[in-house]
Image (spheres, helix red, strand yellow):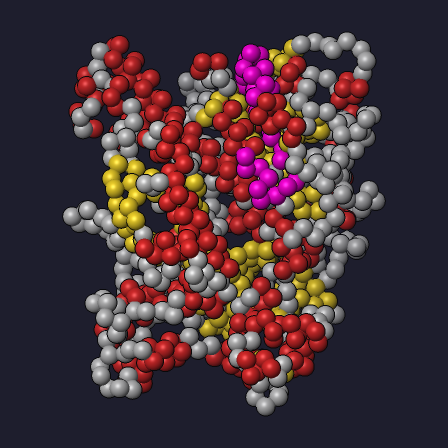
């Protein structure tokens, strides 16, 4: 089934690297030291699919879609290539990393030039795919499904293939309708659809009735939309402060018909094209860039923050070393012979004491290597999601090297210096604003000194080692002033003004109280009878070298708001367990808000959340808390809200708090709203009109079609929090239509978040997630808008979306 190819070829005609990929060539696929096979790879002529040779008897499909590729990395940047190839082939290596949990593909080209062409060509196609407009993405997806339905690859479609195709695109039709649609398009009466008949079928299938209605209402010039008609639409429906020049610019940009463009008209196709671009998106394009004032003190911002950034799974255990041994063969040559067989052959009792010790050491090293790499990637992923505060739980490691892991648990370890290297490389790729490294230090003095040495040598001048000012500061610097800098949060032996003192350097080491989160973990231990141990204040020795790196984020215990006001310097900050923080946010919200006007507060999940679940961050943002740390590794509603909160302001990871959370005279209390500048009463009207191309959830069952419904949720101050939902549409994930209207009463829009949740309705069990999207209410655009949908893990679903009408108006 041939597509017009513009999804893949758009903008790349004649490109040398593209032509190289279309011809293809031999690449060595690397799985292990002993499994390195030469295979043929080439780009399919749709410019969107890679075909590869397979020697499997029961082979899986021999293609993968460019849509599924997350990135291509040149060199030995994967765990597999680092372990299983030699350094001298570095320039011939590259890896293809996929979205989701699919294992990356490690490849070695026959020459440096061919490796360069593969990487350049793939990166160009990936970049090009991301630039496709919504209509092109939709066409690409539909033609891919058509190709899959064309079982005998004759570029024709039988009635049976048509029905298979409809199931592929997630729509269930009865036999009569499918036959009617087929007959209508089969103008040649050949019993198959081909050429223009398939195009006719495509046009019927993708016809958007709701767009017809909107267009016909506003096209008042000979059946088309003139520039003035479009301007009226922009002003009256989209509520934009548009000019005639803006309307003409949109016509020039999106109109496909040259004769209409010559008359400054917009046809229905051009109108749909406009609605499917960023100008027609629910998210205000102006907020994709940094648009807020970044010159305020850093405590005036919400800061995107992760908790236990290094954990892949839960808080208590990681993959076991025996499992790692079974799965990995990199070190098997050095293991005892009795463990070289199948898994059932291995039992500790079959080993001598010496061999068991050796096996345990080797298995641990295998596990450490594997998990270190994955933990390293987790730091990268968090930083690339604009996380600006990462947690480092530091412990003594073997051979004098400090490691990071969740202490007193079975989670695996990763070298401290490797994490610092990863942070250095990726910290400022998404956002140029400062990164806070939150240290939870459990190391002995010698390894603390090594931690300080690693940070100084690796981070270099980017590491903040003294205040920006020439004299003792009285307030925080701004994100603007701290661009590209690393700030260390941790314990400090003395006051910050010691930096400017001319007296002796002071003690080289001393005892300080443990971090509050560490103390909570230790005090939550139970004895052999299951009884909770008596809480006691722990002390640790702190090295001056590490202490001196703590400048603007000195950790101190919280002893009450009045005590903090009278005794704490601005740079002394406290960490709060979620339950304590939520209690303060509910019972002393006003005091908490005023505390956060001069100090930083960090909130962390309770130790009881052993499965790495998350708490609701919204009440803490309502109380002005800046560093609300969540488990980034866990997909959840709470992470959706976090992603939505920090979607704005150019993905900088910093969101300026509303003024009423920043000025000293504020009487704002989110729990008991009173009159004040925070009350900006809005009536929010929303019509959920339709959805397009929702993904199938159960791909193993071809006849399984979703029954979608849409939930619309508001999160903010308690008075604004509300949820409403549409009815479910039976057996239609391709183009379901609801046309259902809801109204929300909003008191404090500056703290409100809007979340869409599309679910597959199930009468007998919990609904399954299809997609979601969240954004600040202040970042939405009024009018007819398309809403992108994200997977559970936050990746965009390329072809899917909602179509809605929104109106956020001043309440009467």
Q: Position of residue 442 (x, y in %)?
A: 54, 19
Residue at the spot 51% in from the left edge and 35% down from the top edge: 379
| Vertical relation: 725 (above or below) 621 | below
Q: How many marks?
A: 0
- Magenta residues span 425-454
Q: Nearer the viewer, residue 182 or 730?
A: 182
Can you name the residue that lies furthest to the bottom here? Answer: 222
- Residue 774 x/y as whole percent: 56, 55
Q: Residue 253 lies in what quarter of the image?
A: bottom right
In magenta stretch: residue 437: yes
Q: Quadrant of the N terminus?
A: bottom left
Q: Does residue 287 lie above or below 79 as drawn?
A: below
The spot of residue 332 in percent (x, y) is: 25, 23
Q: Residue at x 39, y 48 (%)?
A: 118
Residue under the point 80% across and 16% down:
501
Residue 73 is one of the magenta-drawn residues:
no
Measured along the vertical axis of the image, is residue 218 above or below residue 169?
below
Q: Position of residue 136 (x, y in %)?
A: 46, 67
Residue at horizontal 68%, vertical 81%? 228
């Amino acid at each position: 089934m041939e597509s017009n190819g513009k999804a893949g070829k758009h903008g790349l005609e004649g490109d040398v690297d593209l032509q190289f990929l279309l011809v293809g060539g031999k690449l060595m696929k690397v799985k292990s030291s002993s499994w390195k096979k030469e295979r043929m790879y080439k780009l399919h002529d749709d410019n969107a699919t890679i075909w590869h040779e397979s020697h499997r008897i029961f082979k899986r499909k021999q293609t993968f879609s460019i849509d599924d590729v997350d990135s291509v990395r040149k060199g030995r940047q994967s765990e597999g290539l680092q372990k299983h190839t030699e350094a001298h082939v570095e320039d011939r290596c590259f890896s293809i990393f996929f979205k989701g949990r699919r294992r990356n593909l490690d490849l070695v080209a026959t020459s440096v030039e061919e490796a360069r062409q593969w990487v350049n060509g793939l990166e160009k196609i990936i970049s090009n795919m991301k630039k496709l407009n919504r209509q092109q993405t939709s066409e690409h997806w539909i033609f891919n499904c058509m190709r899959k339905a064309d079982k005998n690859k004759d570029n024709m479609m039988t009635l049976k293939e048509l029905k298979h195709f409809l199931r592929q695109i997630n729509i269930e039709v009865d036999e009569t309708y499918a036959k009617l649609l087929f007959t209508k398009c089969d103008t040649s009466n050949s019993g198959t659809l081909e050429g223009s008949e398939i195009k006719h079928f495509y046009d019927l299938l993708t016809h958007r009735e709701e767009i017809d209605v909107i267009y016909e209402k506003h096209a008042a010039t000979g059946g088309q939309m003139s520039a003035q008609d479009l301007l009226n639409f922009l002003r009256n429906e989209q509520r934009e402060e548009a000019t005639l020049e803006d309307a003409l610019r949109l016509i020039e940009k999106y109109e496909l018909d040259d004769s209409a463009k010559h008359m400054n008209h917009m046809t229905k196709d051009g109108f749909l094209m406009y609605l499917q671009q960023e100008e027609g998106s629910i998210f205000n394009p102006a907020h994709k860039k940094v648009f807020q004032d970044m010159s305020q003190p850093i405590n005036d911002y919400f800061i995107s923050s992760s908790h236990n950034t290094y954990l892949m799974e839960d808080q208590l255990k990681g993959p076991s070393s025996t499992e790692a041994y079974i799965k990995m063969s990199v070190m098997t040559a050095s293991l005892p012979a009795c463990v070289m067989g199948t898994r059932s052959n291995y039992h500790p009792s079959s080993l001598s004491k010496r061999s068991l010790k050796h096996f345990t050491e080797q298995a641990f090293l295998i596990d450490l290597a594997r998990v270190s790499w994955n933990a390293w990637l987790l730091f990268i992923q968090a930083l690339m999601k604009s996380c600006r505060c990462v947690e480092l739980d530091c412990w003594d490691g073997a051979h004098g090297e400090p490691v990071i892991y969740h202490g007193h648990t079975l989670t695996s370890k990763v070298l401290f210096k490797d994490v610092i290297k990863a942070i250095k490389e990726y910290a400022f790729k998404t956002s140029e604003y400062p990164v806070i490294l939150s240290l939870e230090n459990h190391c002995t003095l010698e390894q603390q000194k090594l931690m300080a040495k690693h940070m100084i040598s690796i981070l270099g001048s980017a590491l903040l080692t003294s205040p920006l000012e020439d004299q003792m500061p009285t307030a925080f610097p701004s994100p603007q002033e701290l661009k590209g800098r690393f700030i260390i949060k941790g314990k400090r032996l003395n006051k910050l003004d010691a930096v400017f003192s001319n007296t002796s350097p002071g003690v080289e080491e001393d005892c300080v109280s443990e971090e509050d989160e560490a103390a909570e973990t230790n005090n939550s231990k139970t004895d052999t009878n299951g009884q909770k141990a008596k809480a006691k204040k722990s002390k640790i020795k702190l090295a001056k070298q590490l202490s001196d790196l703590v400048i603007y984020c000195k950790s101190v215990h919280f002893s009450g708001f009045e005590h903090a006001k009278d005794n704490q310097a601005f740079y002394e900050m406290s960490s709060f367990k979620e339950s304590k923080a939520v209690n303060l946010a509910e019972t002393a919200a006003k005091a908490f808000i005023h505390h956060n006007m001069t100090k930083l507060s960090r909130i962390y999940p309770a130790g009881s959340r052993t499965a790495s679940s998350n708490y609701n961050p919204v009440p803490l943002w309502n109380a002005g808390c800046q560093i609300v740390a969540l488990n980034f590794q866990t997909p959840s509603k709470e992470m959706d809200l976090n992603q939505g909160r920090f979607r704005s302001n150019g993905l900088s990871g910093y969101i300026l708090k509303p003024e009423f959370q920043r000025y000293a005279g504020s009487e704002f209390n989110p729990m008991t709203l009173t009159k004040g500048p925070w009350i900006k009463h809005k009536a929010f009207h929303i019509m959920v009109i339709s959805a397009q191309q929702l993904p199938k959830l159960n791909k193993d069952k071809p006849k399984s079609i979703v029954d979608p419904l849409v939930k619309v949720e508001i999160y903010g101050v308690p008075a604004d929090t509300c949820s409403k939902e549409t009815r479910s549409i039976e057996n239609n994930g391709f183009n379901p239509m609801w046309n259902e209207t809801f109204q929300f009463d909003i008191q404090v829009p500056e703290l409100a978040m809007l979340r869409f949740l599309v679910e597959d309705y199930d009468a007998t069990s919990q609904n399954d997630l299809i997609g979601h999207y969240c954004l600040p209410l202040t970042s939405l655009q009024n009018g007819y808008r398309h809403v992108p949908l994200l997977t559970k893990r936050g990746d965009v679903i390329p072809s899917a979306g909602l179509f809605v009408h929104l109106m956020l108006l001043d309440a009467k």
